[in-house]
Image (tube, rainbow, N blue to C red):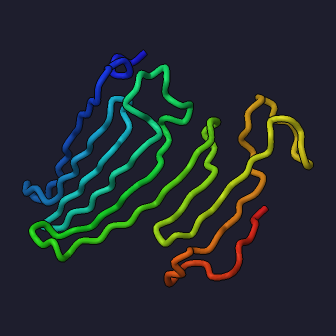
């Protein structure tokens, strides 16, 4: 087992990469990872422009043995754009997702508020879907798209519909 999985406290590490043009640094990308080697933040800076993506996961600050099966799956990603030194030039949006204990995506909500809910066939034969040969629950049965409650431009405005 990876030694970081056994660390009993919050642990983060990171890296920085630099893109150069004609020997001049023009872009920096700072990445931060947690003790499970999951990317928790990526900050890209070029000139005064900053894009940040911060991801939260199912992983908790508890021993590895007590983590839920989907601990490596993302719960939410916050993306923000800003101009360094100008707090009036900032925008952020959040997308969220939910996964079941099999690692299947069961719900996603995009930044506009449009929600998509996915269901899966059981591992046994059901409704015309054969049994999964490996005994997994992984075959998507349907997806339901629900319009944004905010009614933002570009969001679906028709009633919920199923995609099979």
Q: Quadrant of residue 27?
A: bottom left
Q: Quadrant of residue 37?
A: top left
Quick one: 163 or 109, which is closer to the camera?
109
Locate the C terminus and report the quarter of the image it occupies: bottom right
- x, y percent for residue 163: 75, 65
> In screen coordinates, is 9 left or right of 67?
left
Which residue reaches farthest right? 128
Quick one: 80 or 160, which is closer to the camera?
160
Is 1 situated above or below 105? above
Locate the N terminus and report the quarter of the image it occupies: top left
> In screen coordinates, is 8 left or right of 100?
left
Residue in the image at 73% along x and 33% along y = 136
> In screen coordinates, is 64 left or right of 25?
right
Is 56 situated above or below 1? below
Quick one: 27 or 145, which is closer to the camera?
145
Residue in the image at 44% along x and 52% along y = 76
- x, y percent for residue 20: 14, 55
Is 71 situated above or below 107? above
- x, y percent for residue 109: 54, 62
- x, y percent for residue 113: 52, 70
């Amino acid at each position: 087992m990876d030694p970081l999985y056994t660390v009993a406290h919050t642990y983060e590490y990171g890296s920085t990469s630099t893109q150069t043009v004609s020997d001049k640094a023009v872009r920096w990308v700072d990445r931060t990872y947690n003790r499970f080697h999951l990317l928790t933040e990526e900050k890209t800076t070029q000139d005064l422009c900053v894009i940040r993506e911060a991801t939260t996961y199912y992983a908790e600050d508890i021993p590895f043995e007590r983590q839920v099966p989907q601990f490596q799956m993302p719960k939410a990603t916050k993306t923000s754009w800003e101009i360094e030194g100008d707090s009036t030039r900032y925008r952020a949006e959040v997308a969220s997702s939910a996964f079941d204990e099999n690692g299947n995506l069961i719900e996603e909500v995009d930044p506009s508020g449009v929600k998509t809910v996915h269901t899966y066939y059981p591992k046994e034969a059901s409704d015309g879907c054969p049994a999964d040969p490996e005994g997994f629950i992984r075959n998507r049965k349907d997806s339901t798209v629900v319009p944004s409650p905010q009614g933002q431009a570009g969001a679906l405005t028709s009633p919920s519909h199923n995609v099979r």
